[in-house]
Image: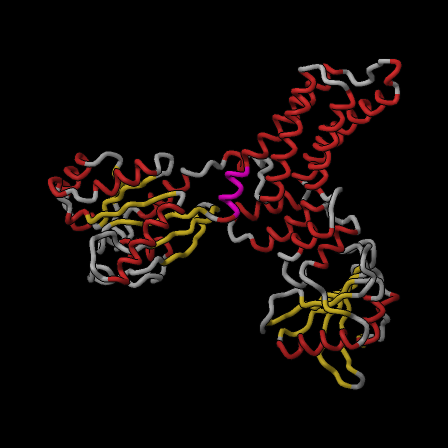
Amino acid sequence: MIDQDTIVALATPSGSGAIAIIRLSGVNAIHLAEKQFKSVTGKQLSKQKTHTIHLGHIMDGDKTIDEVLVSVFKNPNSYTGENVVEISCHGSKYIQQEIIQLFLRNGCRMATAGEFTLRAFLNGKLDLSQAEAVADLITSDNEASHQIAMQQMRGGFSSEIAKLREELLNFASLIELELDFAEEDVEFADRTKFKELVGRIGFVLKRLIDSFAVGNVIKNGIPVAIVGEPNVGKSTLLNALLNEERAIVSEIAGTTRDTIEDEISIGGIGFRFIDTAGIRDTKDVVESIGIKKTFEKIDQAQVVIYLFDAAEFKAEKFQFKVEIEKIKNKYPQKPLIVIANKIDKLNDAQILNLKSQITNLDLLSAKNGLGVEELKAKLISFVNLGALRNNDTIITNSRHYDSLQKALEEIIKVNQGLDSGLSGDLLAIDIRQALYYFGEITGEITNDDLLGNIFANFCIGK
């Protein structure tokens, strides 16, 4: 049941700013706003057209709280599908609270997390996957995650699932119809065409499931561990990548004793760089803990950058080769970039000798910024962006991934049933279950716990 209360919340980030927006939604939203709003031209909000903006003052009795712009959106042509009022006031925290408290005293209640979008879903303005994409859009912090969220919010994923569900539902209806004429032994559903459909649905589901590997990386960023012996320039490289003095740099070995993390966008993809403690034998208890964390971060990272000091390199004393081989053997599928840093201290002959000693070596001077752009290009090459560039549907939501996996399991059972000549009543069981999982994604099948878990992750005001 849709809550009939009129809700209010701050729709912009909390804190002081130039402008803040306070949003009301509900049957009485316009009426309640009208009671506290005094238009400069004497207009009544309830008599104004939808999607109009009005200048005036928010009044608490005879007291003027602020000069504001009030936007009116009448149902069903609003974000929530209800009457909505948005008050643009000055961004003082005091003004924001005064206006919100005024409406709470006069018939509104405080909105819960994600309640505006929940009402949009319940009123049929968005399906569930589109509603979840709203949250992803708000939290998107790079071009790729923004592009995916926009595509899903516009219904790209929903329409693909809806089409599959509709086709499967049509055949399910024919099979259910057969059950009503079981004694006549007739077939309304063409088994050959049905098998073709099941094969096509399975193919699409596998493609969507496979896209989650890319989607998860784009949504959460790619963790990159920068490792190596002490004082080889790991922190300098982190600073060069971030273009700021994020990590402390000194000539003293062991300066970094804990991991330092920060994220940047490269080519529209988020990369989370982890500067780790230098790997060496040490009796320092604190540094030892940092080194232990280094190996934990290597385990968590999707890409590892191994850095060494080119100026200190001696082929006969290539001690860190053992560590490189350890990483390669333990994580054969994990990209490993071996970089010689401080090449600004070498001449051309020394650089050629270095490259002849180590295969697939990258050269860098983190201090001078040489090779940093080439490193960024190499990192981007590890991400398969084909689906993103082709504007294909990409799954980023673990709930969708789980439902797609379960739907595929049921489709495989249906396919096996068709191969073995299973009766219509048994086929119908697996078809119904597949339809259930499709419905879970778009929200045609929901429960209070599911909705509570999804919308609890939204910010209040959205």
- Image quadrant assignment for residue 233: bottom left
Instruction: Look at the image and say whether residue 217 sits in the magenta stretch.
Output: yes
Image location (x, y in percent) of residue 357: 17, 36
In the image, the segment drawn in magenta is 212-219
Image location (x, y in percent) of residue 376: 37, 45
Left or right of 80? Residue 114 is left
Left or right of 21? Residue 229 is left
Which image quarter is the C terminus in? bottom right
Query: Can you say whether 112 is above or below 209 in the image?
Result: below
- Main secondary structure type of the part rendered in magenta: helix
Query: Can you say whether 175 is above or below 356 in the image?
Result: above
Which image quarter is the N terminus in? bottom right
As drawn, which residue projects farthest toward the bottom? 62
Between residues 433 and 382, which one lies in front from this camera angle?
A: 433
Q: Residue at x 59, y 34 (%)?
A: 208
Q: Residue at x 26, y 35 (%)?
A: 360
- Image quadrant assignment for residue 119: bottom right
Query: Can you say whether 353 is above or below 307 in the image?
Result: above
Image location (x, y in percent) of residue 422: 72, 18
